[in-house]
Image (cartoon, rainbow, N blue to C red):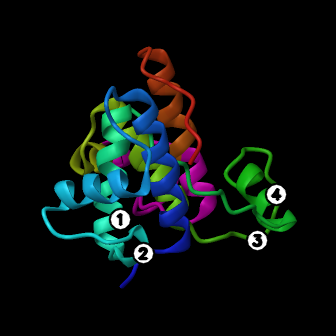
Amino acid sequence: MSISKGQLVRLQILYQQLASHEIGMGKSREERVAWSSARLRKSVTSFKELSFSDAGFLIDQIQSQLGVKAPAAPRKRLDRDAAHSAGTEGRHDDSGKQSTMAGKAEFARIRYLLDVLGWNEQQLDGWLRSTRSPLTHHASPVIRTLGDANRVWWALKRMAIARGLWKEHRA
Protein backbone atom coordinates (compact mmCIF):
# COMPACT_ATOMS: atom_id res chain seq x y z
CA MET A 1 0.00 0.00 0.00
CA SER A 2 1.44 3.38 -0.96
CA ILE A 3 1.61 6.56 1.09
CA SER A 4 -1.68 8.37 1.63
CA LYS A 5 -2.16 12.01 0.71
CA GLY A 6 -2.56 12.92 4.38
CA GLN A 7 0.67 11.13 5.28
CA LEU A 8 2.53 12.88 2.47
CA VAL A 9 1.41 16.32 3.62
CA ARG A 10 2.12 15.51 7.30
CA LEU A 11 5.55 14.10 6.49
CA GLN A 12 6.53 17.14 4.42
CA ILE A 13 5.37 19.57 7.11
CA LEU A 14 7.06 17.65 9.92
CA TYR A 15 10.30 17.39 7.95
CA GLN A 16 10.32 21.17 7.41
CA GLN A 17 9.77 21.70 11.15
CA LEU A 18 12.56 19.27 12.00
CA ALA A 19 14.94 20.93 9.54
CA SER A 20 14.17 24.31 11.12
CA HIS A 21 15.07 22.97 14.59
CA GLU A 22 18.16 20.93 13.74
CA ILE A 23 21.47 22.64 13.06
CA GLY A 24 23.01 21.62 9.74
CA MET A 25 19.91 19.90 8.43
CA GLY A 26 18.92 21.13 5.00
CA LYS A 27 15.46 21.75 3.61
CA SER A 28 16.16 20.90 -0.01
CA ARG A 29 14.52 17.97 -1.74
CA GLU A 30 17.84 16.13 -2.11
CA GLU A 31 18.60 16.46 1.59
CA ARG A 32 15.07 15.34 2.50
CA VAL A 33 15.39 12.24 0.31
CA ALA A 34 18.88 11.49 1.69
CA TRP A 35 17.57 11.82 5.26
CA SER A 36 14.68 9.44 4.62
CA SER A 37 16.98 6.94 2.85
CA ALA A 38 19.30 6.94 5.86
CA ARG A 39 16.40 6.46 8.31
CA LEU A 40 14.80 3.66 6.31
CA ARG A 41 18.16 2.09 5.34
CA LYS A 42 17.07 1.77 1.73
CA SER A 43 17.11 3.94 -1.34
CA VAL A 44 14.32 6.54 -1.48
CA THR A 45 13.88 8.69 -4.58
CA SER A 46 10.72 10.54 -3.54
CA PHE A 47 8.34 10.77 -0.60
CA LYS A 48 5.53 9.91 -3.03
CA GLU A 49 7.05 6.46 -3.61
CA LEU A 50 7.13 5.54 0.09
CA SER A 51 4.95 2.73 1.37
CA PHE A 52 2.23 3.43 3.90
CA SER A 53 4.23 1.77 6.69
CA ASP A 54 7.50 3.53 5.76
CA ALA A 55 5.74 6.89 5.82
CA GLY A 56 4.22 6.04 9.20
CA PHE A 57 7.66 5.08 10.52
CA LEU A 58 9.20 8.37 9.37
CA ILE A 59 6.31 10.40 10.77
CA ASP A 60 6.66 8.64 14.13
CA GLN A 61 10.42 9.26 14.10
CA ILE A 62 10.06 12.99 13.48
CA GLN A 63 7.21 13.37 15.98
CA SER A 64 9.20 11.67 18.72
CA GLN A 65 12.28 13.75 17.90
CA LEU A 66 10.27 16.99 18.00
CA GLY A 67 8.16 15.88 20.97
CA VAL A 68 4.97 16.33 18.96
CA LYS A 69 1.83 14.29 19.59
CA ALA A 70 -0.11 12.75 16.76
CA PRO A 71 -3.14 14.82 15.84
CA ALA A 72 -6.35 13.61 17.42
CA ALA A 73 -8.83 11.89 15.17
CA PRO A 74 -11.91 14.01 14.59
CA ARG A 75 -14.72 13.08 16.93
CA LYS A 76 -17.88 11.73 15.39
CA ARG A 77 -20.81 13.90 16.37
CA LEU A 78 -23.85 12.16 17.76
CA ASP A 79 -27.26 12.81 16.28
CA ARG A 80 -29.84 14.53 18.48
CA ASP A 81 -31.44 11.36 19.86
CA ALA A 82 -28.12 9.63 20.54
CA ALA A 83 -26.75 12.71 22.31
CA HIS A 84 -29.88 12.92 24.46
CA SER A 85 -29.60 9.22 25.35
CA ALA A 86 -25.89 9.55 26.16
CA GLY A 87 -26.66 12.36 28.59
CA THR A 88 -29.78 11.03 30.28
CA GLU A 89 -29.79 7.23 30.27
CA GLY A 90 -28.80 5.89 33.66
CA ARG A 91 -29.95 8.90 35.69
CA HIS A 92 -32.32 8.44 38.59
CA ASP A 93 -34.80 10.83 37.02
CA ASP A 94 -34.59 9.25 33.56
CA SER A 95 -38.13 8.73 32.42
CA GLY A 96 -37.13 7.30 29.04
CA LYS A 97 -38.67 3.98 28.21
CA GLN A 98 -36.04 3.16 25.61
CA SER A 99 -32.63 1.64 26.36
CA THR A 100 -29.62 1.79 24.10
CA MET A 101 -27.00 -0.96 24.07
CA ALA A 102 -23.57 0.13 25.30
CA GLY A 103 -20.98 0.41 22.54
CA LYS A 104 -17.22 0.64 22.06
CA ALA A 105 -17.05 4.30 23.09
CA GLU A 106 -18.70 3.63 26.45
CA PHE A 107 -16.42 0.69 27.20
CA ALA A 108 -13.39 2.79 26.18
CA ARG A 109 -14.42 5.51 28.65
CA ILE A 110 -14.75 2.93 31.43
CA ARG A 111 -11.41 1.36 30.45
CA TYR A 112 -9.80 4.82 30.70
CA LEU A 113 -11.08 5.22 34.26
CA LEU A 114 -9.94 1.73 35.21
CA ASP A 115 -6.45 2.71 34.03
CA VAL A 116 -6.63 5.95 36.03
CA LEU A 117 -7.65 4.04 39.16
CA GLY A 118 -5.14 1.26 38.50
CA TRP A 119 -7.84 -1.42 38.41
CA ASN A 120 -7.91 -4.59 36.35
CA GLU A 121 -10.95 -6.48 35.02
CA GLN A 122 -11.16 -8.69 38.12
CA GLN A 123 -11.33 -5.65 40.42
CA LEU A 124 -14.08 -4.12 38.27
CA ASP A 125 -16.01 -7.39 38.31
CA GLY A 126 -15.67 -7.68 42.10
CA TRP A 127 -16.83 -4.09 42.58
CA LEU A 128 -19.81 -4.61 40.24
CA ARG A 129 -20.87 -7.61 42.36
CA SER A 130 -20.47 -5.71 45.65
CA THR A 131 -23.20 -3.86 47.52
CA ARG A 132 -21.54 -0.53 46.61
CA SER A 133 -22.02 -1.12 42.88
CA PRO A 134 -24.33 1.12 40.88
CA LEU A 135 -25.71 -2.07 39.29
CA THR A 136 -26.85 -3.76 42.53
CA HIS A 137 -30.44 -3.93 41.25
CA HIS A 138 -29.36 -6.30 38.43
CA ALA A 139 -29.57 -10.06 38.91
CA SER A 140 -26.20 -10.34 37.16
CA PRO A 141 -24.20 -7.10 37.32
CA VAL A 142 -23.01 -6.80 33.73
CA ILE A 143 -22.78 -3.58 31.73
CA ARG A 144 -25.23 -4.00 28.87
CA THR A 145 -27.00 -0.72 28.26
CA LEU A 146 -25.92 2.88 27.91
CA GLY A 147 -27.64 3.55 31.24
CA ASP A 148 -25.53 0.86 32.95
CA ALA A 149 -22.37 2.25 31.38
CA ASN A 150 -23.25 5.79 32.48
CA ARG A 151 -23.93 4.68 36.07
CA VAL A 152 -20.60 2.83 36.22
CA TRP A 153 -18.76 5.76 34.57
CA TRP A 154 -20.14 8.32 37.02
CA ALA A 155 -19.35 6.12 40.06
CA LEU A 156 -15.79 5.45 38.88
CA LYS A 157 -15.31 9.13 38.07
CA ARG A 158 -16.41 10.08 41.60
CA MET A 159 -13.83 7.60 42.98
CA ALA A 160 -11.08 9.05 40.79
CA ILE A 161 -11.96 12.61 41.87
CA ALA A 162 -12.01 11.61 45.55
CA ARG A 163 -8.53 10.07 45.18
CA GLY A 164 -7.18 13.11 43.31
CA LEU A 165 -6.56 11.08 40.15
CA TRP A 166 -9.12 12.68 37.84
CA LYS A 167 -7.98 14.55 34.74
CA GLU A 168 -10.45 15.77 32.10
CA HIS A 169 -10.60 13.30 29.25
CA ARG A 170 -12.30 13.53 25.89
CA ALA A 171 -13.11 10.12 24.46
Of the image marks 2 and 1, the number of the one nearer the N terminus: 2
| Mark 3 or 4, closer to the camera | 4
Of the image marks 1 and 4, the number of the one nearer the N terminus: 1
**Where's the N terminus, which quadrant?**
bottom left
Q: Position of residue 125 (x, y in %)?
A: 30, 51
In the displayed structure image, the side of residue 54 where residue 73 appears, left or right: right
| Mark 3 or 1, closer to the camera | 1
- What amino acid is labelled 3 in the image? Gln
Of the image marks 3 and 4, the number of the one nearer the N terminus: 4
Could you tell me how far apart the alpha carbons at marks 3 and 1 are, in whole angstroms? 46 Å
Report the magenta residues as a range: 127-151
Q: Is residue 99 above or below residue 9?
A: below
Of the image marks 3 and 2, the number of the one nearer the N terminus: 2
Q: Looking at the image, which is closer to me, 107 or 168?
A: 168
Q: Which mark is residue 3?
A: 2
User: Dot 4, how many residues are within 10 Å of its Cα: few (below 14), some (14-19), or many (20+)?
Assistant: few
In the displayed structure image, the side of residue 157 where residue 32 appears, left or right: left
The answer to whether the residues at label 2 and label 1 have Cβ atoms under 8 Å apart is yes
**What predominant SS class does the magenta segment belong to?**
loop
Of the image marks 4 and 2, the number of the one nearer the N terminus: 2
Q: Which mark is residue 98?
A: 3
The answer to whether the residues at label 4 and label 2 have Cβ atoms under 8 Å apart is no
Q: Which mark is residue 55?
A: 1
Could you tell me how far apart the alpha carbons at marks 1 and 4 are, in whole angstroms? 41 Å
